[in-house]
Image (cartoon, rainbow, N blue to C red):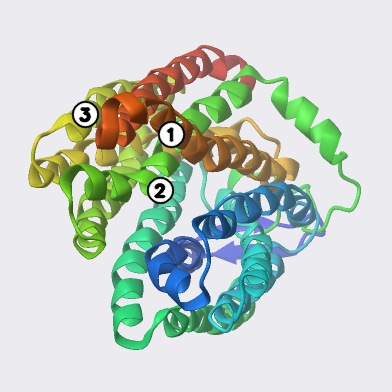
């Protein structure tokens, strides 16, 4: 049992079982976070037909509108999380985006759907930063990477559940009921979280109990950013993560179209294949990355970051294999390899950002990471692939999208590895 104290002297106790419960509950929240976010992708054909929307309007709803507000609002919300109750912020955020997801199912026009979608993004901005901060105060540095890896499973689990279950519900009852079915449970989970999750004192797992749970006198957001950005490890880890994120988002957005154009498959078949060859390997790779990183950390702080370097270098050639393989079945099966290997950087990225941040600014550090990665990956990634595809369409025809994905994935994998390597050279200095 962990028994540490607040600055007031009152004890805070958390059994091993309760810490596992907290981590599991936050994983459920994260799964709904990503499921509600990516569910819309599988519903786009029905939404387009029902509301009579153009591809440009659909692109706005699924892309920039959600990403920009989600990324930018994460920082001020994280500032609140570093000052006040993190569980209250997560509960309120979950309730907000879940309600807005339900309302998306009631939308009767482009404007209504766009507004509700923007509000989903605002709500989801309150999930990850305070969750990272809570996990870092429940788990020591020796356990933190694995704990964050488990929390990181919310991304692949959300994509997997959203694609499979969302598609089945939409086929049986329509796209509107699919959105309501995913949004409604979040309202119940928000209540459970509010009444069962306890907010530990800042620095709980690090043995620093001199920081009050509510800290009104905090550094400004800008000064916090400058302090963190001055650390080479912080800069290079975020830029390395951004380059990998660019690949991941580009693949999630464009690989279905690649299989449709290059291999002539129907979207239902593509979605089922991708759920198992991208979603599950992504989850297993996240877990494996956390466990391997924890083992490497026992021998030194550079080891986990060098794992990120190796993961990106090993994944790079397999993207080429996927995009150049002549048969669709072979291409899907080869996709398992980079999906499993590439994502291993995630837990190390999260844990390193938390490690080089002070305990007072961990939520803000996570929000800054999310802001930068989302702006680079969420906006530039899909757009860059589309531009290169259009530029080469005249000479390559239907193969232009595959060529574009190949160029972006290969270059960004190497670029990501370079930044992770530079981070490994400064981690010892920044941690000290």
Which residue: 41% across, 69% down? 43
Residue 74 in picture, x, y percent from top left = 69, 51
Disc 2 target residue: 253
Q: Are marks 2 and 1 in contact (CB under 8 Å)?
A: yes
Instruction: Rate crowding at label 1 as few (under 14), some (14 to 19) or many (20 or more) other CA atoms within 10 Å.
Output: many
Judge left or right: residue 228 versus residue 312.
right
Residue in the foreground of this view, choosing between 93 and 242: 242
Q: Earlier in the sequence, mark 3 or mark 1?
A: 3
Residues at discs 3 and 1 in contact (Cβ within 8 Å)? no
Q: Badge 2 local density, few (<14 within 10 Å), some, or many (20+)?
A: some
* Residue ID for mark 3: 318
Write down the quadrant of residue 369 in the picture. top right
User: Disc 3 or disc 2, which is closer to the eye?
Assistant: 2
Residue visible at 68% across and 39% down in the picture: 368
| Direction from residue 16 to residue 222 in the image, left or right | right
Separation (CA) of disc 3 from disc 2: 18 Å
Give the distance between the C-alpha atoms of the residues marked 3 and 1, in whole angstroms: 18 Å
Residue 203 visible from this viewpoint: no
Residue 63, numbered label: none
């Amino acid at each position: 049992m962990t028994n540490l104290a607040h600055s007031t002297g009152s004890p805070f106790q958390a059994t091993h079982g309760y810490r596992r419960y907290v981590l599991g509950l936050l994983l459920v929240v994260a799964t709904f976070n990503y499921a509600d976010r990516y569910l819309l992708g599988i519903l786009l054909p029905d939404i387009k037909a029902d509301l009579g929307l153009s591809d440009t309007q659909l692109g706005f709803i699924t892309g920039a509108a959600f990403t920009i507000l989600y990324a930018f609002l994460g920082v001020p919300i994280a500032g609140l999380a570093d000052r006040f109750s993190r569980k209250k912020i997560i509960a309120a955020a979950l309730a907000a985006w879940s309600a807005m997801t339900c309302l998306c199912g009631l939308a009767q026009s482009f404007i209504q759907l766009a507004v509700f979608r923007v509000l989903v993004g605002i709500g989801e901005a309150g999930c990850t930063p305070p969750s990272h901060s809570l996990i870092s105060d429940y788990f020591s540095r020796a356990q933190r990477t694995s704990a964050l890896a488990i929390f990181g499973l919310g991304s692949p689990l959300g994509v997997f559940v959203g694609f499979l279950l969302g598609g089945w519900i939409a086929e049986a009852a329509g796209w509107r009921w699919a959105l309501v079915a995913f949004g409604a449970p979040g309202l119940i989970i928000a209540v459970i979280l509010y009444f069962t999750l306890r907010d530990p004192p800042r620095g709980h797992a690090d043995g620093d109990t001199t920081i009050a749970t509510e800290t009104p006198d905090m550094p400004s957001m800008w000064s916090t950013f400058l302090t963190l950005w001055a650390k080479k490890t912080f800069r290079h880890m975020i830029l390395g993560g951004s380059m990998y994120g660019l690949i991941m988002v580009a693949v999630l957005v464009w690989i279905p179209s690649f299989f449709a154009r290059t291999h002539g498959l129907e979207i239902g078949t593509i979605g089922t294949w991708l759920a198992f060859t991208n979603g599950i390997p992504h989850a297993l790779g996240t877990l494996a990355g956390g466990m391997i990183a924890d083992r490497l950390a026992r021998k030194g702080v550079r080891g986990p970051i060098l794992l990120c370097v190796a993961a990106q270098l090993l994944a790079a050639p397999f993207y080429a294999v996927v995009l150049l393989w002549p048969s669709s079945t072979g291409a899907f099966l080869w996709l398992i390899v980079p999906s499993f290997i590439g994502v291993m950087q995630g837990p190390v990225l999260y844990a390193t950002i938390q490690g080089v941040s002070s305990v007072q600014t961990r939520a803000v550090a996570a929000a800054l990471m999310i802001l930068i990665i989302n702006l680079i990956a969420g906006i530039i990634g899909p757009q860059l692939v589309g531009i290169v595809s259009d530029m080469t369409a005249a000479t390559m025809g239907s193969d232009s999208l595959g060529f574009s994905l190949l160029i972006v994935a290969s270059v960004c994998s190497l670029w990501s590895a370079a930044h992770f390597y530079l981070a490994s050279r400064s981690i010892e200095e920044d941690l000290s």
